[in-house]
Amino acid sequence: MSKVGKKSIQIPEGVGVDIEDGKIRVKGKRGEIEIPVLLGVEVRVEDKEIHLEAKGKRKQIRSNWGTLRSLIQNAVRGVADGFQKTLILEGVGFRVAKNGEVLELALGFSHPVKVEARKGIEFEVEKNVIRIKGVDKELVGQVAAEIRALKKPEPYKGKGLRYEGEVVRRKAGKKAAKTSK
């Protein structure tokens, strides 16, 4: 039995939810998200709450129940408040600049790396801090991961792109290895 699927979802002010043709459409001040209804799950909207019910006992149906509840919850939260991921660029000579909807990153390569914003994604840049904002939690996380993959933090000096709050484990260099003998 899904513990996540049992909980009802509160609909905040300014957010509208419509269910039609096997799709749930969530609209808010920040945008709109459409989610397909998964197999074996019934969705009802009653009194500013969304209730989900599993129509069967199979493992896949129970899995869909919890998954769909999480997807709807993230959509409601996204259109109401939005999601944000923060990346920090560390290293001498590493720079980031925003040129329209394009990020231009100087990451120590022979050429600048350009990253275009996808539909529904917005970039904010302050010095060496990149903020990725959007209504779709999955898309925000995916774009942040793709940008971070361009230059992951290395373990000796910590240079590269890292998430805010991420701890980069440092290794001792050659000097420390020589003195231990």
Image (cartoon, grey):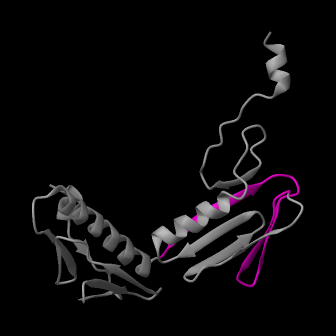
Tell whether position 156 is magenta.
no
Whether residue 167 sits left or right of residue 26 in the image: it is right
For the point 81% across and 22% down, the residue is 176
What percent of the width, then of the height, locates residue 38? 25, 72
Whether residue 100 sits left or right of residue 135 in the image: it is right
What percent of the width, then of the height, locates residue 63? 24, 59
Quadrant in the picture for the N terminus: bottom left
For the point 60% across and 79% down, the residue is 118
Which of the 4 quarters of the picture holds residue 150? bottom right
Magenta segment main secondary structure:
strand
Whether residue 152 sits left or right of residue 1 in the image: it is right
Tell whether position 84 is magenta.
yes
Whether residue 132 sits left or right of residue 100 in the image: it is left
Which of the 4 quarters of the picture holds residue 145? bottom right
Looking at the picture, does residue 172 appear above or below residue 40?
Answer: above
Of residue 56 and residue 7, the one placed in the foreground of this image is 56
Looking at the picture, does residue 16 appear above or below residue 5?
Answer: below
Looking at the picture, does residue 50 appear above or below residue 143?
Answer: below
Quadrant in the picture for the C terminus: top right
Of residue 126 and residue 5, the one placed in the foreground of this image is 5
Residue range (magenta): 82-108
For the point 22% across and 65% down, the residue is 65
What percent of the width, then of the height, locates residue 24? 29, 83
